[in-house]
């Protein structure tokens, strides 16, 4: 992959990807170029030729994960351009949901507007005590455009999501943890990144095929009725019985040894 990006960095550490939004001076605000580069990067990762077993999404510096979509750029946009901008941002949120391995958002500082939306598109969120979430778009005379109107309700419940969105208020770390937006809290960014790496490592002992499929089925079920979701689950449950990983996992249990998964 071309890893020479201007506004993001992508590196591989111990078999895990680390994707960083890298516009520290603007608190990692998401302009069109960030989204174009993210799309380039995520599209390549979709085929997983690098055989990644997980990824971290974070922001450069100590102050912000992502302080939202770039307000300076948006202030000049026409309706058509804003539609294209939202569509591009949404495409990246969907690409993250489609990647065949888990993604942990590592949030320190501000995760506002588009930042909160990007974090919510990851599989789950780790954060430091300094994290500040929110969808303050109405304060700017606009609404969320990268999925916030849809994903926040699913994560924290519709009534609370509406109260947060209509007031534009911040969600601080205690509330974020309490309502299930954040799974784990750390003191420093460094501790958070190594905690996330630890979790990805633990996950990587399991069948990558099964983890990827669990992600796919859980995300697919999000938009479906219970009955439709269960049908997809049963179908994928059946399919995975044809895999080498399933044979290895069940055989290892019977033979009382640790499984060695290949992802096939
Ligand atoms: N877009 C563009 N630039 C931003 C930005 C954003 N979302 N957030 C911060 N910046 C820039 C500031 O303009 C400032 O730049 P200069 O040094 O050139 O003036 C720099 O980052 C540092 O920011 P502040 O000086 O404002 O830092 P602070 O500590 O005083 O405040 C903050 C931090 C509370 C996060 C404040 O910057 C802020 O309110 N930012 C905007 C947050 C926001 O409203 N986000 C939602 C955007 S709308 C959206 O995201 C729509 C969507 O869903 C698609």
Image: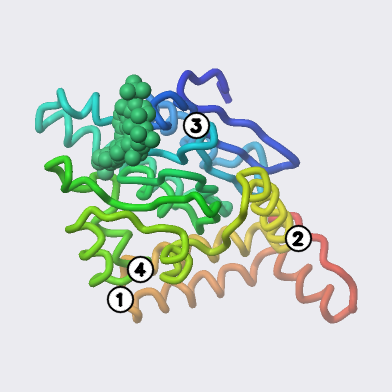
Q: Which mark is residue 160?
A: none
**Camera-side residue: 17 or 162?**
162
Residue located 68% across and 49% down the image: 191
Label 1 vs label 4: CA separation?
19 Å
Q: Which mark is residue 156?
A: 4
Q: Are marks 4 and 2 in contact (CB under 8 Å)?
A: no
| Residue 250 pos. (x, y %) | 76, 76
Is residue 32 something one can see in this rendering? Answer: no
Pick whichever of labels 1 and 2 is earlier in the sequence.
Answer: 2
| Residue 138 pos. (x, y %) | 16, 48
Mark 1 vs mark 4: in front: 4
Q: Does the residue tagged 4 have its C-beta within 8 Å of any atom of ligand 1? A: no
Residue located 59% across and 45% down the image: 55
Ligand 1 is located in which of the four quadrants?
top left
Pick whichever of labels 3 and 1 is earlier in the sequence.
Answer: 3
Image quarter in which the N terminus is found: top right
Picture layout, residue 230 above or below residue 132: below
Residue hosting label 1: 225
Residue hosting label 2: 205
Categorize mark 4 by other alpha carbons within 10 Å: few (<14), some (14-19), many (20+): some
Label 2 vs label 3: CA separation?
26 Å
**Camera-side residue: 180 or 227?**
180
Pick whichever of labels 1 and 4 is earlier in the sequence.
Answer: 4
Categorize mark 2 by other alpha carbons within 10 Å: few (<14), some (14-19), many (20+): few
Residue located 41% across and 51% down the image: 132
Pick whichever of labels 3 and 4 is earlier in the sequence.
Answer: 3
Is residue 115 something one can see in this rendering? Answer: yes
Categorize mark 1 by other alpha carbons within 10 Å: few (<14), some (14-19), many (20+): few
Label 4 vs label 2: CA separation?
30 Å
Picture layout, residue 155 above or below residue 194: below
Q: Which mark is residue 41?
A: 3
């Amino acid at each position: 992959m071309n890893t020479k990006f201007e506004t993001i960095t992508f590196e591989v550490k111990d078999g895990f990807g680390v994707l960083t939004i890298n516009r520290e001076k603007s608190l990692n605000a998401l302009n069109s170029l960030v989204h174009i580069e993210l799309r380039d990067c995520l599209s390549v990762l979709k085929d997983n030729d690098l055989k990644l077993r997980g990824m971290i999404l974070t922001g450069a510096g100590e102050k912000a994960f992502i302080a939202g979509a770039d307000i300076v750029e948006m202030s000049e946009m026409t309706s058509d351009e804003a539609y294209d901008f939202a569509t591009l941002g949404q495409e990246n949120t969907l690409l993250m949901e489609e990647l065949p391995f888990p993604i942990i958002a590592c949030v320190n500082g501000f995760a506002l507007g588009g930042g909160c939306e990007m974090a919510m598109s990851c599989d789950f969120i780790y954060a430091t005590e300094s994290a500040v979430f929110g969808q303050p778009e109405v304060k700017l005379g606009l609404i969320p455009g990268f999925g916030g109107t849809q994903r926040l309700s699913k994560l924290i419940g519709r009534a609370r999501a509406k109260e947060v969105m209509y007031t534009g208020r911040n969600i601080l770390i205690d509330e974020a943890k309490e309502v299930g937006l954040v799974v784990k809290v750390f003191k420093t960014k460094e501790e958070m990144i190594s905690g996330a790496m630890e979790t990805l490592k633990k996950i990587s002992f399991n069948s990558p095929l099964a983890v990827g499929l669990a992600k796919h089925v859980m995300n697919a079920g999000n938009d479906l009725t219970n009955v439709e979701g269960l049908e997809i689950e049963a179908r994928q449950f059946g399919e995975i019985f044809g895999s080498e990983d399933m044979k290895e996992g069940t055989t290892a249990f019977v033979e009382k040894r640790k499984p060695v998964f290949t992802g096939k």
